[in-house]
Amino acid sequence: MISLTFDRIYFASSVPARISDGLIGENVIVGVLAMTFFLDAADNSMNPLINQIRYLADRIGPRRVAIGTDAPVGGVTDPVAAEKQFRETTQKMMDPQGEIKSRWPTHIPEVLDDAKGFQRIGMELVRYFSEEETEGILGENGRRFFDRYLPLG
């Protein structure tokens, strides 16, 4: 399992075919990270996330794509404190030279505003994918992958 947003150079639709073609296979799943600055240089909306998912699904198939976020889907209880903590600590640790151009908000606001963030992603995905494919991207693909490749017990 990998996260494709390893470098902001590779925005959706510009991931080189040599990379995406190498991800085709039964034992691969790609998690698309929902961090704003990995998905797009300036757009904090859900659009870059959906575009990257669509691009990868077209290249490697929707059963190989998943949401790959460690975001607190329920949001933060104190947005002012969260931004301050990010600017004072996290940003310096994750981007000390400013090379990846990290910024606030770190995660897509439409996803983090409340616990219905994944539902919002799902509502957008069903415009492009079947119900089954959408459920897969939202979690079923990951569950199936881990059930198959992680040892029991």
Image (spheres, grey):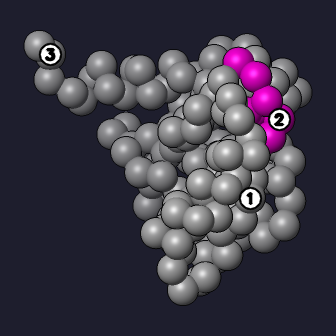
Which secondary structure lies at badge 2? helix
Residue behind mark 1: 104
Q: Residues within 10 Å of mark 1 (few under 14, many from 20)?
A: some
In the image: residue 31, left or right of residue 130? left
In the image: residue 73, left or right of residue 130? left
Q: Which residues are magenta?
A: 109-115
Amino acid found under the numbered disc labelled 2: Glu
Mark 2 and mark 1 in contact (Cβ < 8 Å)? no
Identified at 75% across, 53% down, the residue is 105
* Picture coordinates of residue 12, whole percent (x, y): 72, 60
* Up-down relation of residue 31 to residue 122 (above or below): below
In front: label 1 or label 2:
1
User: Can residue 15 be seen in this snapshot?
Assistant: no
Q: Earlier in the sequence, mark 1 or mark 3?
A: 1
Residue behind mark 3: 152
Q: Earlier in the sequence, mark 3 or mark 2?
A: 2
* Picture coordinates of residue 67, whole percent (x, y): 59, 36
Residue behind mark 2: 110
